[in-house]
Image: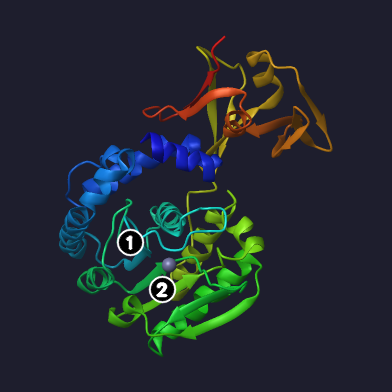
Amino acid sequence: MKMFRKFVSDHFPHWADENEDWRKWATNQIELLGGRKWQPTKQYGRTKRSKRLGVQNSTTLLTLSLENILQEGVLQMGKKKLMIDPGHGGHDTGAISVTGVKEKDINLATALKIAELLKSNPNINVMLTRTTDVFIGLSDRARMANKAKVDAFISIHVNSYKDTSTGTETEYTRDGESKKLAATAQKYLVQATGFNNRGINKLNLAVTRETTMAAALAEPGFLSNPTEESILVSPDFIPRYAEAVARAACEYLGVPYNTTVGVTQPVTVCIGDSDLSDPGIIIDGRSWVPAKMTFAALGFSSWYFQDKTVHINSTSVETKIFDNTSYIRSVDLMSLGMVRSVFMEPDATNPKRVLIIPKEG
Ligand SMILES: [Zn+2]
């Protein structure tokens, strides 16, 4: 879990306060699949062991998914079924970006985000080929989708090439429905990335060839291109990638895109062992805290407000203003080294509480 947290906070700092919610969701997902509870330390805590366990884990996951399929047939009638396939995993890292980020991690984070965006959608049932960092063979991925009789299959990847290629493309193998799905995905992906539109490509790829339903493989940009890479590994990219795929899937499946992600709610902000008198705000599952009050509670004075933006030690941080109060993301306090850690209180429901642990001394 530590390595996992480190990965998340290094590459997706805005997710640090979602870990608990995220883990709960993943646990629920596994329980829904009829399996045992998710044990993140096995996946993320011990690299060597998880490498050795890779094949075994993938078998377990495949079995779980097949059980799930049986349940889905009974419980989820009438819903459109979507399978999202985070590419690579385990010993198969996929591409490694110019700054060392592994494609498999971006793919998994994006897939989990897609599932989060769509899990409350009453018209769609999302399944994933993997929910952890495990290796699964290409044919096994296709088999899962075929057994589940899903209506659409979208594989999540990020591109890489030996030259400085740029741009967004979507692959498919079969004409007809797969081509239509690929074109829909491409439309949303290009909007999300703003990169050069490389169009859709007919390629003979295992997952799009061996699946029997509409199947497409997304390649939003090139991790091998320094300019695109800096965008692809930035914290804002994964939610954009995920939303593009989620919207494309809904459009292709003919169901409205709706999500509870984007709903705002108040959150109690607890710093050390006392709550602030004013609440923070949860937006899209991320907590924002009232800046001035938080700094006062932390005894921090090296900040100022300029151009509608809060600056901490002369660094500007993303700021939202509601009712003349400026809010900053609680995880920014952590990434700027002002506090030790930030957590969403795991069991709090209404209102939620974000716990900010100050540095010692
Ligand atoms: Zn890939």
Residue visible at 22% across and 41% down?
37
Q: Nearer the viewer, residue 70 or 216?
A: 216
Residue under label 1 = 125
Q: Tag 2's secondary structure?
A: helix
Q: Say which quarter of the image contains residue 212.
A: bottom left
| Residue 252 vs residue 85, the one in the foreground | 85
Q: Position of residue 229 (x, y in %)?
A: 60, 60
User: Which residue: 41% across, 90% down?
Assistant: 175
Q: How far across and down, in percent of the image, does residue 137 sit? A: 26, 67
Q: In whole angstroms, how far apart are the C-alphas of marks 1 and 2?
A: 11 Å
Q: Is residue 132 left or right of residue 185?
A: left
| Mark 2, residue position | 253
Q: Secondary structure at mark 1?
A: strand
In the displayed structure image, the side of residue 191 where residue 253 appears, left or right: left
Q: Quadrant of residue 140?
A: bottom left
What amino acid type is highlighted by mark number 1? Asn
Question: Disc 2 marks which amino acid?
Answer: Leu
Q: Position of residue 151 (x, y in %)?
A: 32, 74
Residue at point 22%, 57% (across, down) = 58
Q: Pinpoint residue 220: horizontal percent, then vertical percent.
A: 54, 68
Label 2: few (<14), some or many (≥20) within 10 Å?
Answer: some
Q: Quarter of the image containing the C terminus?
A: top right
